[in-house]
Structure formats: structure tokens, C-alpha cells
Amino acid sequence: MIIVTDTKSTEKIITLIPFLRNCAEKIYLAANHSKMTLVIPRDPHAQPVAVITSQNLSRGNRFESHITTSDPGIVAKMKTEINSIIDLHSIPIHELY
């Protein structure tokens, strides 16, 4: 599992590093406000799934929205976007701790 989290949450993330290291192979910090989950199974016959949501774990009385899809075009686009964030705009904090 790979996690890309927002640099604005750095203080919170630093305290969670021991927990996150047990959950994820790699952890990146980036100017990332997106709320995306991309599940790409190791089994080549299983279908990848993408989830995009507005929810960011805040509490309030506002409506949130989301989409869950296995559309190959959307999954491929999300994978490209996530890799671009990781490759061009992130700090790999898993290498620091």
C-alpha cells in the first residue's frame, strides 16, 4: 500500500508514522488535497477499483459526495495522476523514518 497525504497534515502524520509504517510500504507528503483511493489487486485477474470522494474526515453538516468505479479509463487516469504527484511533487517520508 502507498499513502500520499497532504503536507498541511504533517504534524498529525509525524505522530502516526509508527502506525502508518505497519499499514503502508511507502508514505509520501505532497500538496495533495485530493481524496482518492486506488485499489490495484496483485491478482492480475481481479479488477482494479477507484474511489474519489469529497470527504476528508472533517465533521460538519455539509453534504459529501463520492464515486466508486472500476472503469478502466478512470482507473488508468487516477494511476497516472497519483504517479505524477509521487514522482514530481512529493517527499518520500518512508525513507526518512
Image: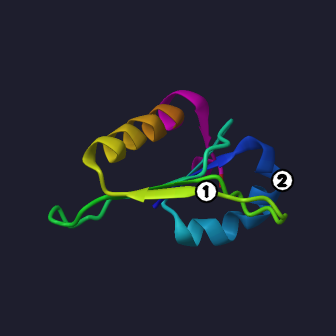
**Pick the front one: 10 or 82:** 82
Quarter that holds the C terminus: bottom right
Q: Secondary structure at mark 1?
A: loop
Identified by mark 2, the residue type is Glu
**Residue 70 visible in image:** yes
Residue 68: percent from left, percent from top: 43, 59
Identified by mark 1, the residue type is Ser
Residue 53: percent from left, percent from top: 58, 55
Look at mark 2 in the image and give the residue it sits on.
11
Q: Which residues are magenta?
A: 86-96
Structural distance between the alpha carbons of marks 2 and 1: 27 Å
Q: Residue at x 43, y 38 (%)?
A: 83
- Asked whether the residues under the numbered discs 2 and 1 touch, taking CB atoms below 8 Å apart as contact, a structural biologist would say no
Look at mark 1 in the image and give the residue it sits on.
65
Residue 79 disc label: none
Residue 16: percent from left, percent from top: 73, 66
Secondary structure mainly formed by the magenta segment = helix
